[in-house]
Every structure is written in structure tokens, then in C-alpha cells.
Amino acid sequence: MSSETISLPTAISDLYPFQQNRIRLSCGYEMSYVDKGEGHPVLMIHGNPTWSFFYRELIKTLRPGFRCIAPDHIGCGLSDKPKGAYCFKLDQRIRDLEDFVDGLGLERFDLVVHDWGGAIGIGMALSRLKSLRRLAVLNTAAFVDSRIPRRISLCRAPLLGKLIVQGFNGFALSATRMAVSCKPLDDATRDAYLYPYNSWTNRRAVYEFVKDIPMHVSHPSFDRLLEIENGLLQLREKPVALFWGGKDFCFTNHFMDRWKRFLPQATAVHYAEAGHYILDDESEKVCSAIEKFLSYDADGISGNKLV
């Protein structure tokens, strides 16, 4: 493991003022991660096409009382961008995260997940249930579902999808507009989301994530996602809270309702006007609510209001 200060553009580092740490995983590539604060560890897992920058305000909120750990998946953010052999599939992503957790020696942690980070983070946690204390779920899924927006289906099309996503940056660029609902992202925030994905090579992981959405039983990641879905019942004994943006174009309220059926004990906090990037649309409210959720004692969250 090593620490370094990467020279980011000033406008980005002002928003994301964190030293970067690096750890080499068994896949052979180095993962970059933020590790700020002291106390009980909170592991924050991003999705696609974001990176640990997505959690910047949550880190600032929690770091006075928690150890905030936010990794960038391989190929994403400031982590290594594989040019050669690497399996961009759900199972490998989970193995990477398992390596990461073991490498940091995390014996007990809370978990915050968003977008593809839901399947990856929960897939890791199901093999370490004794280590998982609390789970915060932000607009994501960790189960099989047939619903996918048409615009994402287009990005999965052979040849055309690769040209849109990897060639013209259509997926990440569109997300900076479509993933927020309350207010447009300012220029610095938009540029920060796009910063790691500034070339054909650096956008490979974005495209591979889109390709890895398992919509059919023949998909190579379908069985792994179904395995995670079947394991969700094991989380019924854990404190879980859903923090949901009601205007998400991708993970709609349909997905929140499915979470409630899988985990009926979960507290659900619905932000009717927030979009997919819920930590941008309702930053102060959501960060405060997550802090309250993670700060409750071992008796759980019953009877406590998160808003």
C-alpha cells in the first residue's frame, strides 16, 4: 500500500481535496482509494460511470467520526486502466473488492452502495456477513430485473454501443445531465465526473460495465447476480436503510419497492425530486440522514427518524 497526492486540476481538487492511496490487488492492477478520518470504517462503493468523487460530500460529513474508505474500481476513477488482460465482469469486481477489504484488514465495517456498487458491494458483503454492521442503499439493485431504459439498451448494442460509450463518451457525458433532477451540475462538478474518462482507452471500463448488465440467463454475469439476489434474505437481520431519489431515470421507484420486499425491515427515505446522482441533488439532506443512520447504537434504527 502507498499514499500519494495526484495533481488534479484545481477546480476538481477544491471539490475533492483527498490524498489518494493505492493498493495492488491479486488481479495485478492497483486500486486507488480515499481513506479519511478515524473510527468505525464506512466503505463506499460507486457505480458506473462515476468514481469515488461521487462520495465527496458524504466523506466530508462523516470523517469527523468515521473512517471513510472510498475505492475506485479497476479501470475507473484514479485506479489503473487496464490496456491488456482483465476480466471486466461482476465476479471479478467482487473479487477485487474482497482483496481490497482483506488488504486493509477490515474486520468490521458499514457499507454504502450506489448503482453497480450495489451488486459489487453486497456481493462482497454476503461472504463477510459477520463483518457487515450496517448497509445504506442508494438507487441501485442487487437482483435480477428485466427493466432497463432504452437509452442504456442502445449503449449495449454491438459496435454502435462501443462507438457511443467509448468513442464519443456518450454514456458518462449524458449522465452528467440526465442523472440530476433538482439542478444542473456546475461546470467543475461535471468536469470532475468526466475527468478519469478522457480518452477511448480510459473509457473502456465504462463500456464494459454497460455490457455487463445481465439481462438474459445466457449472460456470463447472470448466475452471479442471481446468487447475490438469493443471498439478500441473509441481510434481514442487519440494519438497512434505503435512500432513494424518486426521479431516477434508471433505478426507478420500482427498484425501491423490490428492495422493500427483499428487506422488509429496511427504513426507506424517499427524496421525491432527486435523480440518480442523489448525493448531488440532495447532498446535505442525504449525507445528514446517512450520518444519523450510521451513528445509531447497536439497538438498531427502529423508532428513529432519519429526516
Image (cartoon, rainbow, N blue to C red):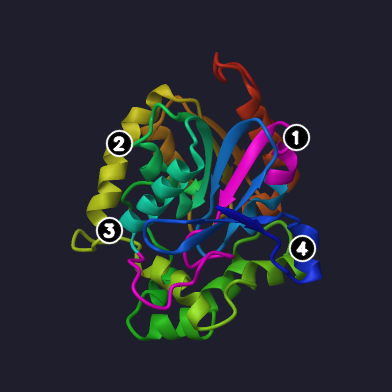
Which residue was labeled with disc 2?
A: 231
Magenta segment's dominant SS is: loop
Amino acid on which disc 4 is placed: Ser
Magenta residue check for 75: yes
Give how far apart the Cα atoms at labels 4 and 3 are: 36 Å
User: First in sequence: mark 1 or mark 2?
Assistant: 1
User: First in sequence: mark 2 or mark 3?
Assistant: 3
Q: Residue furthest top?
A: 299
**Region of the chain picked out in magenta, as a range:** 59-88
Relative depth, front residue between 175 and 25: 25
Amino acid on which disc 3 is placed: Ser
Q: Which mark is residue 13?
A: 4
Which residue was labeled with disc 1?
A: 64
Residue drawn at point x = 34 percent, y = 35 percent: 232
* Image position, residue 282 (x, y; %): 70, 48
User: First in sequence: mark 1 or mark 3?
Assistant: 1
Give how far apart the Cα atoms at labels 4 and 2 are: 39 Å
- The local secondary structure at tag 4 comes to helix
User: First in sequence: mark 1 or mark 4?
Assistant: 4
